Image (tube, rainbow, N blue to C red):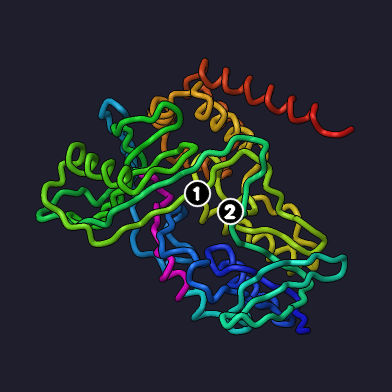
Amino acid sequence: MERVDVAIVGAGAAGLSLAHRLDRVLPHRSVVLVETPEAALRSPERTWCFWEEETGEWDAAVCHRWHALAVQGPDGTTWRSRIHPLVYKMIRSRDFEALVRGSLQRVRTLHWTVTDIVDGPGEAVLRLRGADGAQRELAAGLVFDSRPLVGLPAEGVTLLQHFRGWFVRTDRPRFDSSAAVLMDLRVPQPERGVAFGYLLPFDARTALVEYTEFTREVCSDAAYDAALRDYTENLLHLGVFTVTGVEQGVIPMTSAHLPERVGHRVFRIGTAGGATRPATGYTFAGVQRQTRRITAALVAGRFPVGYSAYPARHRFFDAVLLRGLDEGVVDGAEFFATLFRSNPLPRLLRFLDGSSRPWEELAIGLGTPVADMSTALWRQVRAGRRVASSLPR
């Protein structure tokens, strides 16, 4: 049985990011990236968006950037702002994958499907299945598993950020490409949760137009297409256009605790390890923080623990919001409209990235519907007490 120092399971954003970092700083350690050869188990091509300063480590894969962001409230009011010194960036997964794979020098890629991981005090054993059905095992000193969770923990609140987007080309100029629209809250709202349009204009005639919901259940294909037709025709007034591509996805937004370490030698990264911001669904920036902290620990000869992507107090803030949306206590559209109306965008982006200061968080809190959020806070605290009282003593 082959033995390696580090095995990374999965070649999505998290797995590739960690492979990229370890390839550069652990020249004397054996690292493998284990990627399934089964197309049905791989994620479809997609885009990732995030904000950072003008110059970043992944700029070679960035396909578009915006220096201003906008939000439209339910009544059509628009808030727009430059976000200097930050920039909103988009990366296509195929470009990111090509960049990382082209740079790997020491990390080997194994094309096998991981069927099980058996943890042990000294090493973990990965059970693998080949494309032809062959079986083998691989032992690793550390395993970083980026595969999606089969199920989420029962405690807490879980909503799904689910969406479908059309890449469109209009017959004449229709878009202002100088700003991305993070949320267009004019769309019809669900009874609980929130729905919004998301608009990324690439130039005057091409854009990604998405319909997104934060709710418990996903929509049917027909419902997504109906919502997109309504949005493009009745709110954006795009006129004649061609759909050149489709993007669709589901991102879990949960207040449940997702432990990073799940065994003596097994760790989770990516969404499964808590890299997704529960209140927004943004993941790419959280993945970068996770993988940087893991790499720093390994370089220093330490066990990779404590690499959470977001501060504990921010996860609690998100839990309160998810509770309020799920139980219908908070009007989702009004909450987000008030949030953007009352705060400068750079401050909000710092908060959503987990880098804001307590005084900024207080100002943000006071700029939300305070009565509704207070009710949600009380319900979250009460739910936490119920969970605590049910635990064995």
* Residue 359 in which image quadrant: top right
Q: Which residue is mark 2?
A: 271
Amino acid of disc 1: Ile
Q: Nearer the viewer, residue 360 or 186?
A: 186
Which of the labelled discs sits on residue 343, or is there none? none
Mark count: 2
Question: From the viewer's perspective, is residue 320 above or below residue 287?
Answer: above
Q: Which residue is mark 1?
A: 251
* Residue 49 in which image quadrant: bottom left
For the residues marked 2 and 1, what is the alpha-carbon distance in whole angstroms? 8 Å
Per the image, label 2 sits on a secondary structure element best described as helix
Q: Position of residue 29 (x, y in %)?
A: 74, 79
Q: Which residues are magenta?
A: 82-98
Pointer 2 local density, CA inside 10 Å: few below 14, some 14–19, many at least 20: many
Q: Nearer the viewer, residue 138 or 24?
A: 138
Q: Position of residue 235 (x, y in %)?
A: 21, 37
Amino acid of disc 2: Thr
Q: Is residue 90 visible?
A: yes
What residue is rendered at 57% in x and 27% in y?
A: 362
Q: Is residue 17 magenta?
A: no
Q: Position of residue 10 (x, y in %)?
A: 59, 68
What residue is rendered at 17% in x and 42% in y?
A: 233
Q: Is residue 363 visible?
A: no
Question: From the viewer's perspective, is residue 348 above or below residue 299?
Answer: above
What residue is rendered at 53% in x and 46% in y?
A: 252
Q: Marks 1 and 2: in contact by CB < 8 Å? A: yes
| 392 horizontally vs 321: left or right | right
Pointer 1 local density, CA inside 10 Å: few below 14, some 14–19, many at least 20: some
